[in-house]
Every structure is written in structure tokens, then in C-alpha cells.
Image (cartoon, grey):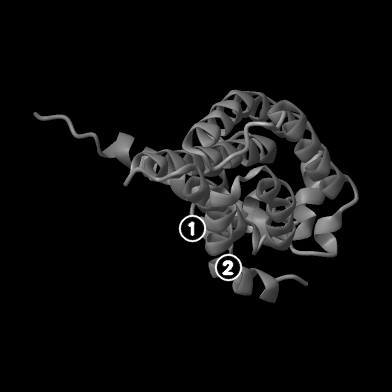
């Protein structure tokens, strides 16, 4: 009798459904407010089935964040490889992707992330991995003529990181939507590293998104 891969395919599909549903709930309500029972109920599965796949909420949260980050990486890799996009177009796509994903996030989600050490360690690891990619991206921008040659990009990266740390530590996202903050950080730092050609492309691209972002400012 021919073997079927239904159990494996179903299990994989169930994993993805759980991650998608749980991240939607965490982002909408905050992490603390969402119980494992709630997720099982939302998916119409037993709590036992859920715990067989994810032992606890922190494991589920970590895997959900990893899954979301992997999807974002895949999207950007596909975008960058398509139609010979230049660094400005790639940068704007990256900004728009993060703006879209952050518009509906409950501030409580960010407040509560620090309670999960494995999640924080994952973000630290991701940050270190991104440094090499950032350096390569800045170098490409210089070669394309859109980024300035006289910028120390190591210093720029450290200052940008410090700025976002300040946003999180002071909970500025409770006063302004995160998409609005990201837009302004882009204007402050990215526009400053662009050549005249880069500024023209950047301003043209930002003009297409600024109206939507300004409506979500508060």
C-alpha cells in the first residue's frame, strides 16, 4: 500500500496555523492577556494538541517571532533579487513592510517582551547577524551612487540602534504609533546619508507613503 504524507502535511499546516493565530492574538491584545486556552479555542483544537506541539507560551511566542522574521527575510530576499531593484527601492520596501506590520500592534506587546529571556536572546542574535548584511548594503549603496562615501556607517549603525533603544525604553510607542516613529527615523538618518540622486529617489518614494503614515501618527 502506498504511504501517504497526510499526517506530516497536516502537522506542518497545523504548526503554521498555530503560529499565525497566536502572533495575531499577541500583537492585538498583548502577550499577557492571551492564554494557551484562548489560542486552542481560536483554532478549534484541544489544549492537549497545542501543548504537544508547543510546551508553553514562551516557546510559542519565540517560534512565532522566528516564523515572522523568516517570512520577512524571504520577502526582502525575493524583492531584492527581482527587477534589479536599487538600494533606495529596497530600503523603502523594508520600511513599508515594517510599517504595515507595526500598525496594529498593541503597545502592551512591546512592554511585555522583556519578560521572556529566550525571546530577548533571539533578538540580540538577530541584531548581530544583521550587522554584516547592513555593512554590505551600505557598501552597495555607495557603489550605486545613492549613499555618500564620507559616512562612517559603523557609527551610524550604533547611533540608530541607540535611538531605537531609546524609543523602546521610554515607551515612546505609547505616544506615537511605531510606524510614524519609523518614518521619522528614516527621514532623520537615511536621508542624511544619501547623495543628491539618492535624496531624489528617497523623497519620491516617501511621498507615496507619507499621507497614510501621517493619518496613523496618533
Mark 2 Cα shell of 10 Å, populated few (<14), some (14-19), many (≥20) = few
Q: Which quadrant holds residue 149?
A: top right
> Considering only order in the chain, which callout, 2 or 1, is on the residue closer to the N terminus?
1
113 and 140: which is toward the camera: 140
Let me know if residue 46 appears in the view: no
The correct choice, above or below, for 190 with respect to 187 in the image is: above
25 and 102: which is toward the camera: 102
The correct choice, above or below, for 177 with respect to 97 in the image is: below
**Residue 135, image x, y percentages:** 60, 27
Q: Dot 1 lies on which element? A: loop
142 and 62: which is toward the camera: 142
Residue 9: mark in rendering: none
Residue 44: mark in rendering: 1
Q: Dot 2 lies on which element? A: helix
**Residue ID at (50%, 56%):** 43
**Residue ID at (85%, 64%):** 175
Looking at the image, residue 23 sits to the left or right of residue 34; the answer is left
Q: Which residue is mark 2?
A: 207
**Residue 88, image x, y percentages:** 52, 48
Amino acid at each position: 500500500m502506498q504511504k501517504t504524507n497526510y499526517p506530516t502535511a497536516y502537522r506542518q499546516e497545523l504548526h503554521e496555523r498555530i503560529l499565525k493565530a497566536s502572533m495575531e492574538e499577541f500583537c492585538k491584545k498583548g502577550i499577557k492577556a492571551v492564554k494557551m486556552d484562548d489560542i486552542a479555542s481560536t483554532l478549534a483544537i484541544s489544549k492537549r494538541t497545542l501543548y504537544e506541539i508547543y510546551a508553553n507560551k514562551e516557546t510559542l511566542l519565540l517560534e512565532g517571532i522566528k516564523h515572522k522574521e523568516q517570512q520577512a527575510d524571504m520577502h526582502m530576499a525575493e524583492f531584492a533579487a527581482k527587477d534589479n531593484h536599487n538600494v533606495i527601492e529596497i530600503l523603502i520596501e523594508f520600511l513599508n513592510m515594517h510599517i504595515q506590520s507595526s500598525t496594529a500592534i498593541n503597545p502592551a506587546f512591546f512592554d511585555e517582551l522583556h519578560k521572556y529571556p529566550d525571546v530577548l536572546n533571539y533578538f540580540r542574535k538577530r541584531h548581530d547577524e544583521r550587522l554584516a548584511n547592513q555593512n554590505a548594503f551600505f557598501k552597495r549603496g555607495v557603489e550605486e551612487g545613492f549613499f555618500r562615501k564620507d559616512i562612517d556607517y559603523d557609527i551610524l549603525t550604533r547611533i540608530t540602534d541607540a535611538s531605537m533603544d531609546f524609543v523602546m525604553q521610554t515607551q515612546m510607542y505609547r505616544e506615537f504609533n511605531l510606524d510614524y516613529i519609523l518614518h521619522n527615523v528614516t527621514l532623520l538618518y537615511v536621508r542624511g546619508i544619501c547623495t543628491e540622486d539618492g535624496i531624489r529617489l528617497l523623497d519620491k518614494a516617501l511621498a507615496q507613503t507619507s499621507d497614510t503614515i501621517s493619518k496613523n501618527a496618533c
